[in-house]
Amino acid sequence: MALLVLGSWLATRRLAVTVRPGRWQNFLEALVSVIRGQIRDVIHQDPDRHLWFVGTLFLFIALSNLLAVVPGFHPPMASLSTTTALALCVFVAVPLYGISEVGLMNYLRQYLEPTPLMLPFNIIGEFSRTLALAVRLYGNIMSGAVIGAVLITLVPFFFPIVMQLLGLLTGFIQAYIFAILALVYIASASAAQREKLEQQQREES
């Protein structure tokens, strides 16, 4: 978190509207543009509403996983407590986004569809989805860390370096998958109700 805060401050302290921005600003604008593009491609909506949350998830997980190459650094995602905390953030964000977009009653109504008998199953689905997010990220990062440690002990030269590089790639991919899944869950929380409201508006007009 300290690295992210410091990096953000360094990258944004001299932002300027200019033809030739600095290297930090160029990198920051490119990064934000890529994340915005990915969000738009996935949900086909204005990405700015989701950029701050999904982008922060991606950057935090990606940087945490990339720092695994630093000697003595224990990847935070290799702890189930950390991945559970991130999954809980998504768990809270899903209804907040949904309610802000379609309203409280319209959001809660989807738990009763297609029949009120589905209420307990829909609630269980919300919790199981959160659990799956936490365990998936934890399992992938933890297994990579354990395998790397074993290989360094058994073959302490070239092969562990290759595994570390593969671990970096895996960590980056896991950050991307977690952020995309969070985005999909948030977008799907209100998609059906939003379509119904739009259809009602069209019928009324």
Image: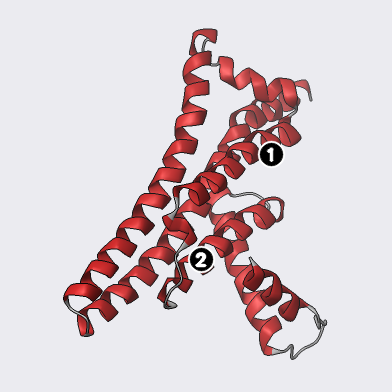
* Residue drawn at the location 49% of the way across and 49% of the way down: 83
Q: Is residue 175 left or right of residue 191?
A: left
Q: Which residue is mark 1?
A: 97
Residue 200 quadrant: top right
Give the colouring mode of the picture: secondary structure
Regarding residue 47, the answer to whether it shows in the image is: no
Q: Is residue 27 left or right of residue 142?
A: right
Q: Is residue 187 left or right of residue 156?
A: right
- Residue type at tag 2: Ser
Q: Provide the secondary structure element on which disc 1 rests.
A: helix
Crowd rating for badge 2 (residues with CA inside 10 Å; few <14, some 14–19, many 20+) = many
Can you give x and y, in whole percent of width and height, for residue 37 in the image? 58, 62
* Residue drawn at the location 63% of the way across and 80% of the way down: 27
Q: Provide the secondary structure element on which disc 2 rests.
A: helix
Q: Which residue is mark 2?
A: 64
Q: Nearer the viewer, mark 2 or mark 1?
A: 2
Residue 107 quadrant: top right
Q: Nearer the viewer, residue 44 or 123?
A: 123
Q: Quadrant of the C terminus?
A: top right
Q: Nearer the viewer, residue 184 or 5?
A: 5
Crowd rating for badge 1 (residues with CA inside 10 Å; few <14, some 14–19, many 20+) = some
Q: Are marks 2 and 1 in contact (CB under 8 Å)?
A: no
Give the vertical position of 137 relative to 201 (above or below).
below
Can you give x and y, in whole percent of width and height, for residue 31 in the image? 61, 72
* Mark 2 to mark 1 CA distance (whole Å): 26 Å
